[in-house]
Amino acid sequence: MPSGNAPTVRQRRIGSALRKARDHHNLTVATVARRFGRSQGWMSMVENGLQAIAPEELSDLLDFYGIDDGPLRESLLHLATHKPGKWVREREGRISAAALDLASLEEDAAEIRTFQPCIVPGLLQVPDYTRELITAGPIQHPRNAKWLVDFRVSRQQVLSRPDPPRYVPIIAEAVLSNRVSGDPEIQRAQIRRLAEVARLDHVDLRVLSSSASKYLWLASPHHLISLRPPGRLTVSVVDHFAQSIFVEDEDKVAAHVETFELLLSATLDKTASLRLIDEIASQS
């Protein structure tokens, strides 16, 4: 039975690394399980991300595979040790597992990079903007909408904590004028919020100008979340319709990072982006 002891994206990442290490030594699951003193079923579930593994057992397995001190070992042990914050756990059963996974990764991030060509990124949305987006979808009950709005507001606390992650959001220029409601005050409040956050030292908000629209086709909305310690492990989260797809394969993540860097190179710099946002704010 799947374990609920850790966010599944963490378990999957640990499992894929262990499977890769086992394959490197040309060992079967049965052989490792026998030598390690665990059942074949338990070992298979760990490798498939369906079972949490205690940090002590993970350390022993890494020793078994000869994975010495270094970035990989440090990252995997960090994943096994970290537990999501209380505010994330309290929302289990009300918020989707994928959304909780995303929040837990953000909570543990050293850097968050986001590309949003159509809407304001979730970590920068004001509540009324979020509510308009959510209620445009198939919400079955008003209470569900309130939970989702509150959850997104809670996620935003990561940017105001004492040790915030570096945050690099890229938005298309059209996002600054796209209205989500007939109430112009919502858009005005949202632009003011962008101008406020863009001035924070740890935020590097970039605008992809309309003159660079040819770059918009390069990628779907996505997030690149690099976990602490910096540079050790990055997960790509791709928004596809109503789903969040977690990409953990190192080669695929590297390709997403390369695309993000290409998009970033086409944006206005931080100063010019803020100038444009201020200009739109003054007109609204």
Image (cartoon, grey):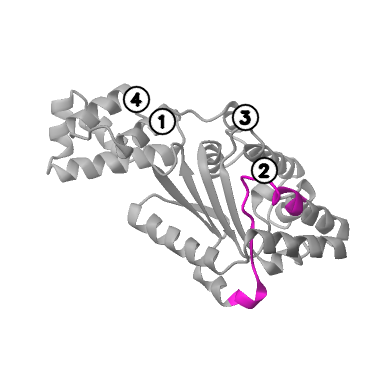
Q: Earlier in the sequence, mark 3 or mark 2?
A: 3
Give the spatial CA distance, label 1 vs label 4: 15 Å
Q: Earlier in the sequence, mark 3 or mark 1?
A: 1
Q: Which image quadrant: the N terminus?
A: top left
Q: Quadrant of residue 243?
A: bottom right
Q: Residue at x 43, y 41 (%)?
A: 9
Residue 87 numbered mark, or none: 3
Residue 55 numbered mark, or none: 4
Where does residue 181 sit, x and y in percent of width and height?
A: 81, 60
Residue type at the position of mark 1: Ser
- Residue 272 visible here: yes
Q: Quadrant of residue 17?
A: top left
Q: Is residue 265 left or right of residue 273?
A: left
Residue type at the position of mark 2: Arg
Give the spatial CA distance, label 4 vs label 2: 30 Å
Q: Which image quadrant: the C terminus?
A: bottom right
What element does badge 1 sit on? loop
Frontmost of labels 1 and 4 is: 4
Outermost residue toward the front in this view? 271
Verify CB contact (< 8 Å) between mark 3 and mark 4: no
Q: Residue at x 54, y 73 (%)?
A: 215
Q: Which residue is mark 2?
A: 152
Frontmost of labels 3 and 1 is: 3
Residue 246 numbered mark, or none: none
Q: Which residue is mark 1?
A: 3
Give the spatial CA distance, label 1 vs label 2: 25 Å
Q: Which residues are magenta?
A: 193-213
Mark 4 closeness class: few <14, some 14–19, many ≥20 residues within 10 Å: some
What element does badge 4 sit on? helix
- Assess whether residue 156 is covered by the magenta stretch: no
What element does badge 2 sit on? helix
